[in-house]
Image: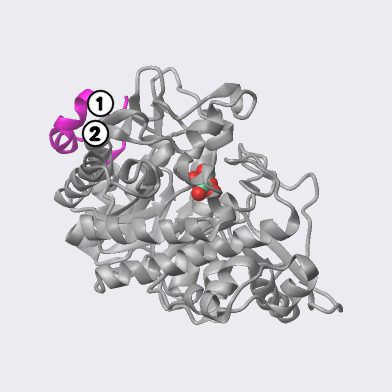
Amino acid sequence: MTWFTRRAFGKSAALVAAGSAWLPSLAQATRKEKVTGEASERSFPTGFLWGAATASYQTEGAVKEDGRGASIWDTFSHSPGKTFHGETGVIADDSYHRYREDIAIMKTLGLTAFRFSVAWPRIFPQGTGQPNAKGVDFYKRYTDALREAGIQPFCTLYHWDLPQAMEDRGGWRTKDTSKAFADYAGYMVGQLGDRVSHYMTMNEMGSFINSGYGGGRDAPSVKLPKQQFAQARHWALLGHGLAVEAIRSVRPQVRVGCAEGAAPIIPAFNAPEHIAAARKAYVEENAEYLTAIHTGKYTEAYLRELGADAPVFTAEEMKTIATPTDFQGLNIYSATPVRAADNELGYVVIKNPASYPHMASSWLSLGPEALYWSPKLAAETFGIKTIYITENGCSADDVVAEDGEIYDTDRVMYLNAYLTQLQRGVSEGVPVKGYFLWSLLDNYEWSEGYSKRFGITYVDFPTQKRTPKLSAKFYRNLIARNGL
Ligand code: FCB
């Protein structure tokens, strides 16, 4: 049977009471634990946050509604040949209109937190200047609805949809964008008031700068000369730091961090020399973003390698970049294995052979141990006290079976393997306080269009019908047990 069709959401309570093909076993398991007092064998601490994540351009649609300005992703996705089959986020999951339905899904899953992003061009259609009240109101309604459902909103202020007007004025090539971002961030946090307690300034500088301005397949997809590229990285970092300051000055009580796709270093295998190599690699392989944020310095090796192309910066800017944050978000998908080496750095990154297994996206190689090692290395290296896994999940070639179900056993395998490693770390004291699965829904996967499905909820894009996959049931069971 289909777990929940859209029409059935209102009846969710009745369905739970009546039981369904998969619920009885969960109910029995819970009963057994209660009777015998047995805990789940691999449990997470009480209060561990279970979430899922999405981003504005990937899910909202409604790109011309209520005064939203254009973003670089509108421009890029409408440029011939840039995205899979020329697909755009014009409709995406239509979540701008269907967010209540999405929240009902979250509630059924038992989520206690949800990570979403605000589209800057909905708030400031021109990037700066007059704010757009209708855009602000949308996120007020959205976060109110999340809270009414008992779900804690985690808000990302920049998940890649830069207002096109800002790009026209230089985008991340300029310090003005860093300042404009901070102004927008402070304004938005003030508007949302006590609805939101956790903010991420930016999502993955390592993607939107490296790929967007380094000749990759993300908007605006330009290839800057080396020095300008290093400078763009610096302005993104500064934008983060200025935003932390702006947010704190508006609402000192909120928790602020960023969500970075830091290099997910793991030792080649569990041996002291490779673990020592992994520690060194964590600093150097993350020199351009994470290390700068947590130490206020670009490493010597990073600056040496750039030579004359190094960014121009001041001590004051570095101080701003390293403004202490309350938590670090880590987006972790693959693993980067390193081994000890007798060279200047003391390590070498191992390139996986062609036969190394990957998920439906060729870049997404399987590396469950990253969910053990990366948060551990981040905590040990930089003394970070609170970490959230702000993204983890995978693409799969989902098919709807004859009975209407989606048996994404590969995604279940992936999640099971990664979460086992996360539990291993948390039980050893690695300070991860919550996990956000990417993604709640199949959505617009950037330049891959709709060809790559990352959701635990299947979306039939022509009808927008949502159907929970096997992985959604896996996740619901895990959340209910607070363990594997
Ligand atoms: C991450 C992005 C997210 C999504 C996943 C698959 O790098 O932050 O928006 O595209 O990859």
Q: Quadrant of the N terminus?
A: top left
Mark 1 secondary-structure assignment? helix
Q: Quadrant of the C terminus?
A: bottom left
Residue 11, magenta (yes or no): yes
Question: Are discs 1 and 2 less than 8 Å apart at CB?
Answer: yes
Q: Height in image: 35 above or below 312?
A: above
The percent position of residue 21, horizontal first and vertical second, equals 30, 32
Q: Nearer the viewer, residue 49 or 247?
A: 247
Q: Amino acid at mark 1?
A: Arg
Q: Height in image: 412 above or below 64?
A: below
Please tell me how crowded label 2 is: few (under 14), some (14-19), or many (20+) other residues with Cα within 10 Å.
some
Please tell me how crowded label 1 is: few (under 14), some (14-19), or many (20+) other residues with Cα within 10 Å.
some
**Marker disc for residue 101:** 2
Q: CA distance from mark 1 to mark 2?
A: 7 Å
Q: In this rendering, does residue 161 appear at all?
A: no
Where is mark 1, residue-wise? 6
Q: Amino acid at mark 2?
A: Glu
- Where residue 387 sits, quadrant-wise, is bottom left
Tell me the chief SS of the magenta region: helix
Numbered range of the magenta stretch: 1-23
**Residue plotted at (49% across, 58% down):** 176
Residue most extreme to the right: 342
**Residue plotted at (23% across, 53% down):** 151
The percent position of residue 432, horizontal first and vertical second, equals 42, 69
